[in-house]
Amino acid sequence: MKFLTRSIYNFVLKFLRNSKYRWLIVVASLLYLVSPLDISPDVIPVLGWLDDGMVITLLASELTQVLLEHRQTRKKDVSTSSTVNSTADLTA
C-alpha cells in the first residue's frame, strides 16, 4: 500500500511541474468537488470525506504554488523594469 501511494505521489509531482498540466489538475479537481460522483461516497463517514479532503489539499497547494510563481515573476519584472529605467536615467 505504501509503495502504491508513493508511486502515485511521485507521478502527480512530475505531472504538476509542467504549468500546462497544472491548470488541468486545478480544473479537474474543481469538477470532482462539485460533481455528484465520488470515488468513495460521502455517506461513508470517514472514507467519504477523506478523498474530498485530499482533493481540496491538492487544489489548495496547486493554487498557492501558481500564485507564488506569479508573484515572483511579477516582482522580477518590476525589478527589471526599474533597473532599466534607472540605467536610462543615468545615460540621459
Image (cartoon, helix red, strand yellow):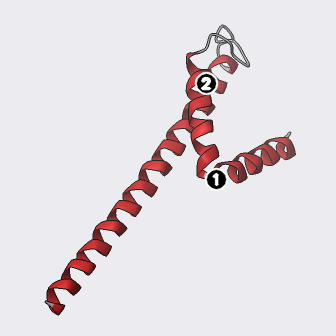
Q: In this view, does 2 lie above or below 31?
A: below
**Residue extending furthest toward the top:** 43
Q: Nearer the viewer, mark 1 or mark 2?
A: 1
**Residue extending furthest toward the bottom:** 91
Dot 1 corresponds to which residue?
Answer: 18
Q: In this view, does 62 lie above or below 47?
A: below
Quadrant of the rendering where the C terminus is positioned: bottom left
Q: Which mark is residue 52?
A: 2
Amino acid type at circle 2 is: Asp
**Callout 1: few (<14), some (14-19), or many (20+) C-alpha neighbours within 10 Å?**
few
The answer to which quarter of the image holds residue 69 is bottom left
Quadrant of the rendering where the N terminus is positioned: top right
Mark 1 lies on a secondary structure that is loop
Left or right of 58? Residue 63 is left
Mark 2 lies on a secondary structure that is helix
Who comes first in sequence, dot 1 or dot 2?
1
Residue drawn at point x = 60 percent, y = 44 percent: 22
Q: Position of residue 56 (x, y in %)?
A: 55, 31
Q: Where is residue 59 in the image (x, y as percent from the top left)?
A: 54, 36
Q: Where is residue 85 in the image (x, y as percent from the top left)?
A: 21, 78
Looking at the picture, tell me which residue is in the foreground, 5 or 13. Answer: 13
